Image (spheres, rainbow, N blue to C red):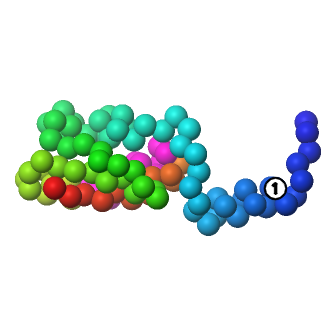
Amino acid sequence: METERIDRVLKRVVAGIAGEERPAVGLDVETLWSRMVDDRLRAHTYVNRVDRGCAFIRADSAIYLQQLHLNKTKWEKEFRKITGGRVRRIDLSL
């Protein structure tokens, strides 16, 4: 096993604590979203983008947006668990 300098280890640890962007290896938020929601919601919603730990989810009508808001905390917890904290919250809009 190769040893690593302490300053490199500390930089990596501090970067993780500070919430700096980490590479999203194998992270496909669109696929995760399609697996989390049912078929009806999947047809009317999509992931617009992911930026700084926030997934921006769009709905095509106010009815589906309201349904998204009802389950927002559940999906945020699921995103945090599956992505290891890379996606910490979701933003919902039309």
| Number of disc labels | 1
Specify the quadrant that holds the N terminus: top right
How packed mark 1 is, by other alpha carbons closer than 10 Å (few <14, some 14-19, many 20 or more), is: few
Magenta stretch: includes residue 74: yes
> In this rendering, does residue 10 appear at all?
yes
Residue plotted at (53% across, 48% down):
84
Nearer the observer, 78 or 59: 59
* Amino acid at pointer 1: Arg
> In this rendering, does residue 67 appear at all?
no
Nearer the observer, 19 or 81: 19
54 in relation to 2, above or below = below
Task: Tell me if 33 is positioned left or right of 61 in this view.
Answer: right
The magenta span reads 71-83
Magenta stretch: includes residue 86: no
**Quadrant in which residue 10 is drawn:** bottom right
Specify the quadrant that holds the C terminus: bottom left
Residue plotted at (87% across, 58% down):
6
Task: Tell me if 25 is positioned left or right of 52 in this view.
Answer: right
Circle 1: element type:
helix
Secondary structure mostly seen in the magenta stretch: helix
Residue plotted at (27% across, 51% down):
57
The residue beneath circle 1 is: 8
71 in relation to 37, above or below = below
Q: What percent of the width, then of the height, locates residue 45?
A: 20, 44
**Quadrant in which residue 19 is drawn:** bottom right
Residue plotted at (92% across, 45% down):
3
